[in-house]
């Protein structure tokens, strides 16, 4: 079983506009699905994955409820596991975490660049503590974002400083611990109590570096992801296979670890 742990989609009425805006601000990136949840599901399945985890992001406090309403609606679709999001500046963020947990949502996505907070800012720690208390998985965009390069809000070193606030809760650093911060992730995050997802690695992360990260961090804490629509699931699967890992490690990364984390039989 292959689980793509890092994907994105949008409500159909705004999908085209959202995709165009994101592509433009990131250097005219090519999209590999048309934008909606059904487009995403068809694409990842045609490319070899059976499940897709959709990482929604509340980019401002006003969006928070509607973003999470959308997550709850699409989470019911077979093959999709939708994460919600909260905005650190929302006065209702902690209550919204409880609403997500009651609805059966398994986790949240936080994007410090889009949400304008530094990952190790102690004002956000109550949010981390609450998410962990509720058993929610917290996924961070880690490292640089090619559409918003400065300042860097979630460095590997800063995320390592923030981890104790989760009190052992489940945390995922996207982009193999930090996009374009891979050697820093190897030094400061690998080996800690955190998962890495592999999203946006194909043609970008040197394979020897990936193998070094996996060796130090353990294949048991690596989750396959693509970043669809911005990188194709099949090419990202091929990237993992090209690493020539032991068969049991490859299977764990491509789906076994995520299945355990998400409770998928």
Image: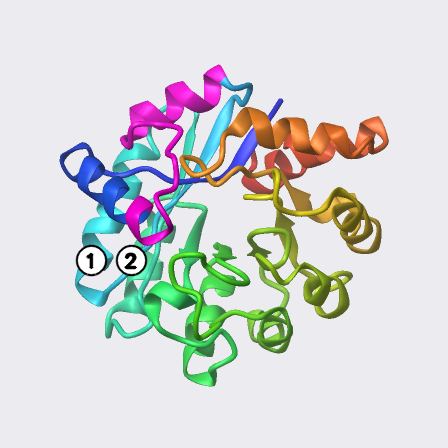
Q: Position of residue 162 (x, y in %)?
A: 57, 75
Tell whether position 27 is magenta. yes
Towards the viewer: 65 or 30: 30
Element carrying mark 2: loop
Say which residue label 2 marks: 58
* Tags 2 and 1 touching, CB below 8 Å: yes
Q: Position of residue 123 (x, y in %)?
A: 41, 83
Task: Give the farthest residue toward the left.
Answer: 13
Give the mark nearer the N terminus: 2 vs 1.
2
Q: Is residue 193 left or right of residue 35?
A: right
Q: Is residue 171 left or right of residue 207?
A: left
Element carrying mark 1: helix
Q: Which residues, given as a range, are shown in magenta?
A: 23-46
At x 19%, y 32%, the residue is 12
Measured along the vertical axis of the image, is residue 257 above or below residue 107? above
Q: Position of residue 5 (x, y in %)?
A: 53, 39
Q: Is residue 254 left or right of residue 153?
A: right
Q: Marks 2 and 1, Cα distance to the nearest angstrom?
A: 6 Å
At x 45%, y 59%, the residue is 145
At x 24%, y 58%, the residue is 64
Crowd rating for badge 1 (residues with CA inside 10 Å; few <14, some 14–19, many 20+): some
Q: Position of residue 43 (x, y in %)?
A: 41, 21
Measured along the vertical axis of the image, is residue 119 above or below residue 185? below
Quarter of the image that includes the N terminus: top right
Say which residue label 1 marks: 63
Measured along the vertical axis of the image, is residue 123 above or below residue 4? below
């Amino acid at each position: 079983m292959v689980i793509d742990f890092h994907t994105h989609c949008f409500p159909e009425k705004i999908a085209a506009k959202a995709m165009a805006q994101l592509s433009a601000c990131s250097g005219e990136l090519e999209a590999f699905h048309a934008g909606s949840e059904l487009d995403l599901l068809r694409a990842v399945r045609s490319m070899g994955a059976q499940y897709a985890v959709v990482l929604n992001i509340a980019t401002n406090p006003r969006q928070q409820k509607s973003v999470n309403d959308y997550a709850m609606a699409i989470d019911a679709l077979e093959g999709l596991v939708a994460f919600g999001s909260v905005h650190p500046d929302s006065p209702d963020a902690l209550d919204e975490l409880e609403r997500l947990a009651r609805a059966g949502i398994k986790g949240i996505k936080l994007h410090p660049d889009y949400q304008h907070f530094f990952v190790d800012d102690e004002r956000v720690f109550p949010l981390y503590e609450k998410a962990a208390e509720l058993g929610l998985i917290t996924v961070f965009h880690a490292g640089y974002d090619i559409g918003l390069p400065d300042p860097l809000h979630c460095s590997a070193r800063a995320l390592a400083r923030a981890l104790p606030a989760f009190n052992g809760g489940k945390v995922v650093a996207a982009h193999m611990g930090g996009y374009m911060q891979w050697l820093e992730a190897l030094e400061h995050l690998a080996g800690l109590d955190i998962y890495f997802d592999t999203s946006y690695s194909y043609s970008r992360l040197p394979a020897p570096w990936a193998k070094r990260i996996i060796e130090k961090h353990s294949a048991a804490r690596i989750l396959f992801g693509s970043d669809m629509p911005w990188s194709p699931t099949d090419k990202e699967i091929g990237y993992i296979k090209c690493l020539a890992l032991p068969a049991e490690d490859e299977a764990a990364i491509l789906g076994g670890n995520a299945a355990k984390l998400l409770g998928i039989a």
